Image (cartoon, rainbow, N blue to C red):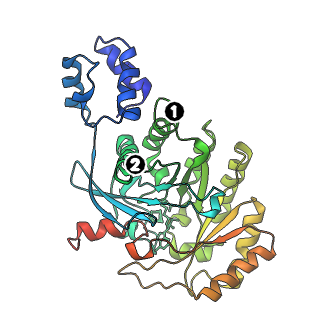
Amino acid sequence: MLTQSQLSERLVNHGQPSYRATQILDWIFKKRAKAWDEMTNLPESLRVDLAEHYPLRPLKHTLTKGSEDTTRKFLMELADGRYVETVLIPASPALYGERSDRHTLCVSSQVGCAYGCKFCASGLDGFTRNLSAAEIVSQIILAEEMSGEKVNNLVFMGMGEPLANFKNLCLALEMITSDWGLNIGARRITVSTSGLVPQIKKLAELPQQIRLAISLHGPDDVTRDKIMPVNRKFPVNELFEALRFWNLQKNQKITLEYILIDGVNAGLDHAAILAKRAASIKAKVNLIPYNTVEGLEWVRPSDIACREFQKVLFQAGVSATLRLEKGHDIDAACGQLRLKKEKGVL
Ligand code: SAH
Ligand code: SF4
């Protein structure tokens, strides 16, 4: 799968007229061809040549968990036998301010993750490799095919750290937002990061109005250092300086993701610092009670404690959602399904 300019260049270099690019992109993104052979308005020799170099379907669906009207999780196999997860969530979280008939797809950007956050299944087995732009985009095409639903919101909150795969992320964003591609509006796309400061600044400079979510999980260095090793490289003050830069470039609110873990970051003192931090960049906060991961000993606070935490934010005038758990029963925290598959449990 190539972008329009990559494809035109490739075709022209091989003596083909450039209008072939338009034909091919139409087959891939609009008609959703499953094989090069279906592209009957292309010369056969060209189809054979392209089929040899560019697999049209780099992912294979292997398993679905969950059912219609609930969160559905798709496990997809890559050509090298690795697995990625993609999750389809029927009503998009109130947090994003969308209508409830929307479908949000949560895509992966890497196999595994190098950042090793202490609460996260994706980081448990370390980093394997980046996904190509084609592998990222194919998750959307395949999820639409499997579910029969049109994806209208996209979040990069699956496995991996999207900003550590920056080049492929940008190529994928081009394929996803262009009218020759999937044509999903940039404002309907959220990239989530654990806080890679230089890449946040680079992303801020892209012309597309994509949204940004930060996996904060600790409002100060002492708390964040304990659970997110990335904080030692990019401490909270530096991160917030990058977020202020983001605010200057874009006119949408940043979302701060905050997992509530009992005895770690869920005290009312943490809430007060978080409230100040969020207010300083006019961010909204998404509180997520910790989702149990096999092999990790963290636990979520009681519902009452979660509500108390949220109240502190409200009282400071910060908008904060407390996410009602969806997909808790299908290993919805990123990386859990794939780990089971690779360890032979599934
Ligand atoms: N690497 C990026 C993108 C992945 S997003 C990032 O960290 O932002 C995955 C989201 O799920 C992150 O906000 C992450 O902190 C959260 N998450 C990971 N493990 C979780 C768990 N056990 N319970 C709830 N949320 C979890
Ligand atoms: Fe990687 Fe994000 Fe999980 Fe941290 S939370 S290990 S950055 S996927």
Which amino acid, mark 1? Ser
- Dividing the picture into quarters, in which one does residue 118 lie? bottom left
Indicate which disc, 1 or 2, sits on the residue closer to the N terminus: 2
* Other residues around mark 1 within 10 Å, as few (<14) / some (14–19) / many (≥20): some
**Picture residue at 66% right of the left edge, 52% below the top:** 242
Q: Provide residue 335's location: percent of width, then percent of height.
A: 37, 66
Q: Secondary structure at mark 1?
A: loop
Residue 100 position within the rendered picture, expressed as x and y whole percent measured from the top left: 60, 59
Side of 336 relative to 151 (left or right): left
* For residue 108, side relative to residue 318 (left or right): left
Q: CA distance from mark 1 to mark 2?
A: 18 Å
On the image, the x and y values in percent for residue 27 come to: 35, 29
Most foreground residue, 19 or 165: 19
Let me know if residue 125 appears in the view: no
* In contact (CB < 8 Å): disc 1 and disc 2: no
Q: Quick check: 46 left or right of 12? A: left
Instruction: Tell which of 231 and 310 is nearer to you.
Output: 310
Residue 5 drawn above or below residue 266? above
Labelled disc at residue 36:
none
Residue 225 visible somewhere in the drawing:
yes
Rendered residue at 77%/64% (across/down):
279
Q: Quadrant of the C terminus?
A: bottom left
Whether the residue carrying mark 2 lies under 8 Å from ligand 1 is answered with: no
- Mark 2: which amino acid? Glu
Residue at mark 1: 178
Q: What secondary structure is marked by label 2?
A: helix
Name the residue: 56% across, 66% down: 231
- The residue at which mark 2 appears reads as 144
| Residue 108 vertical placement versus 297 (above, below) | above
Q: Residues within 10 Å of mark 2 (few under 14, many from 20)?
A: some
